[in-house]
Amino acid sequence: SRSRQWQAALRLLDRMAAQGERPGTVAYNAALAACAQGHRWSEAVDIWARMRAGGVERDLITHNALLGAMGRAGRWAEALDAAQRMQAEGVRPDEVTQCALVSACKDGG
């Protein structure tokens, strides 16, 4: 089911790393999107941190996927913090960013 794709995505990232491959932005973004679909916001945060630690570029899609995961979980405070970090890194928000933030605030109370 789609809600469990996040597990397969994390296994794939781990397998790539174990084989000496360095997952890129696209692979990480796919894993982030799977975590958002599966309502796994804390795993999305872990992936975002792995990208940062590994020096992997975090682009607009990366940030929007993270915000989407937080939004689906109603984690409005974390989403607002992440949006501020996004702007501090020079990534300009778009309509998807705004929708994710509105969703997080709406679902978070």
Image: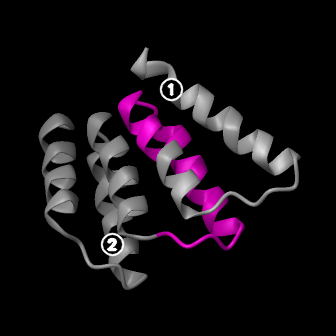
- Residue 89 is labelled as none
Residue 47, how many percent across, how many down?
A: 59, 50
Check the image and tell me how it is coloured: one colour
- Residue 5 is labelled as 1
Q: Secondary structure at mark 1?
A: helix
- Looking at the image, residue 51 sits to the left or right of residue 16; the answer is left
Q: Secondary structure at mark 2?
A: helix
Residue 41, how many percent across, how many down?
A: 44, 39
Give, as a single range, the part of the protein colored magenta: 32-58
- Looking at the image, residue 81 sits to the left or right of residue 28; the answer is left
Q: Is residue 105 above or below residue 11?
A: below
Give the total number of marks visible in the rendering: 2
Q: Is residue 37 above or below residue 26?
A: above
Q: What type is the residue that disc 1 sits on? A: Gln
**Upstream in the sequence, badge 1 or badge 2?**
1
Q: Quadrant of residue 15?
A: top right
Answer few, some or many: residues within 10 Å of disc 1's Cα (few below 14, many 20 plus, some between 14 and 19): some
Whether residue 69 is in magenta: the answer is no
Answer few, some or many: residues within 10 Å of disc 2's Cα (few below 14, many 20 plus, some between 14 and 19): some
Q: What residue is rendered at 17% in x and 46% in y? A: 105
Q: CA distance from mark 1 to mark 2?
A: 28 Å
Q: What residue is rendered at 50% in x and 26% in y? A: 5
Q: What residue is rendered at 16% in x and 44% in y? A: 103
Q: What residue did someone put label 2 on?
A: 84
Q: Quadrant of residue 60?
A: bottom left
- Residue placed most toward the observer, 77 or 22: 22
- Looking at the image, residue 59 sits to the left or right of residue 106; the answer is right
Q: What residue is rendered at 37% in x and 73% in y? A: 86
